[in-house]
Amino acid sequence: MEKRLKIAEIAARTQLSVSTVSRVLAGKANTSPAARSKVLACARELGVMEGMAAGRLLLNSLVVFAPQRAFDERSDIFYYRVIQSMSKALGLHEVRLRYCALEEFDSDAQLFLTKMNEAETQAAILLGIDDPHIHDLAVDVGKPCMLINCRDRRQRLPAVSPDHRAIGELAAEYLFEMGHRDVLNVLCLRRYTMELRLVGIRDAWQGHNIKFNDKRDLLVVPSFSARETEEQVSAWLSKIPDNALPTAFLVGGDFMAAGTISALQKHGLRVPQDVSVMSIDGFNLAAIQDVPLTAVHVPRDELGTEAVHMLQQRLIRPEAPAGTLLLNGMLAVRESVRRIRPGKRRTAVERDGLYDA
């Protein structure tokens, strides 16, 4: 009864029909922007928005800005899957989803403004866009805008992201729990998010009173590809005497882990009998070279889903303070990491296995 009275009151105040008010509050597409604006403003004034069902999304058109590679599964499977999860979450609503490619830095500001100022653009999601000028423009335009896996350094725009620092720390902590103390970290540091993972790894080392030495404990690879990682790890292995090999490799992605394992095997090392390998990713290659890969899963599908829910709440409560939702990683224990006894560096390499012909 209260709901009907409020709808009637909103209709009277806005001089719109009851059916129009109902359609707007139900998130239907067949209403004009002017009518939507009037109804939502009045509904907020009357406190109707606070009591609305959580399942409604009060918009009909959304633009996703992301790097070009995000729209190609072969170029960036992580971002591609984030977009797919976003699309799935919006499938429950009458929302038209549009896409626009932008560079991470030095983005095309004019293109961004053109898309944002189109009448049909009611809100936007920025995926992996680090350009601070674009963030400034998003604030100035004034339409609801969510960030995914990037941050507004002035803390004006709401965001959802993996907790990269905690994820790095979790991965390193697991290796320490398994008895490893000599760990080589193979990482691509092309983005600040990867730097945050390295900070978390350093935190774990410090927590165990072990000094992190970049020259000894860190191998930086320019990309996440298996080929480049294999080349870099092979070159590193060729310079290291057998008695100086680490007991474990902590690798910044599944394809990088594939390259690492390939390089180790070509040097006569078995995983995990001789050397353990752990990944920070865990989605793309659960098993590499018949080795089930231990990994910390980085939130991926959850990012798109949570961004839609956060945008939903932003539409209901636009005056609420902006914040960042950090999603935890999840440890997936498989067989690529073995426990070692205190003081035991690694198993001696046996060229012939027990059942080799």
Image: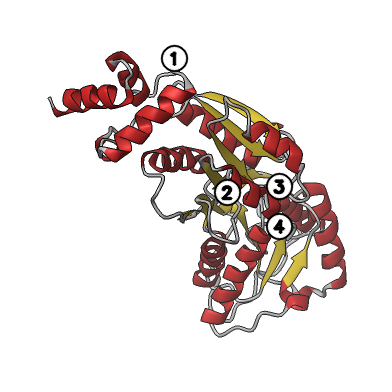
Which residue carries the number 2 mark? 139
In this view, the residue in front, 190 or 317, is 317
Task: Give the SS element for disc 2.
Answer: helix
Task: Give the SS element for disc 4.
Answer: loop
Task: Give the SS element for disc 1.
Answer: loop
Q: From this viewpoint, is residue 56 visible?
A: no
In the rendered structure, which amino acid carries the disc numbered 2? Val
- Asked if residue 1 is positioned above or below residue 145 in the image, the reply reads above
Q: Nearer the viewer, mark 1 or mark 4?
A: 1
In this view, the residue in front, 206 or 68, is 68
Residue 200 drawn at (x, y percent): 57, 69
Q: Nearer the viewer, mark 2 or mark 3?
A: 2
Residue 80 drawn at (x, y percent): 64, 35
Image quarter hosting the N terminus: top left
Separation of marks 3 and 1 at Cα, in angstroms? 46 Å
Separation of marks 2 and 1 at Cα, in angstroms? 28 Å
Which residue carries the number 4 mark? 191
Separation of marks 2 and 3 at Cα, in angstroms? 37 Å
Q: Nearer the viewer, mark 4 or mark 2?
A: 2
Comes first in the chain, label 1 or label 4: 1
Which residue carries the number 1 mark? 30
Separation of marks 4 and 3 at Cα, in angstroms? 17 Å
Comes first in the chain, label 3 or label 1: 1
Callout 1 crowding tier (Cα within 10 Å): few <14, some 14–19, many ≥20? few
Separation of marks 1 and 4 at Cα, in angstroms? 42 Å
For this view, does 76 lie left or right of residue 7? right
| Residue 255 disc label | 3
In the rendered structure, which amino acid carries the disc numbered 4? Arg
Comes first in the chain, label 4 or label 2: 2
CB within 8 Å, label 4 to label 2: no
In this view, the residue in front, 212 or 43, is 43
Color theme of the render: secondary structure
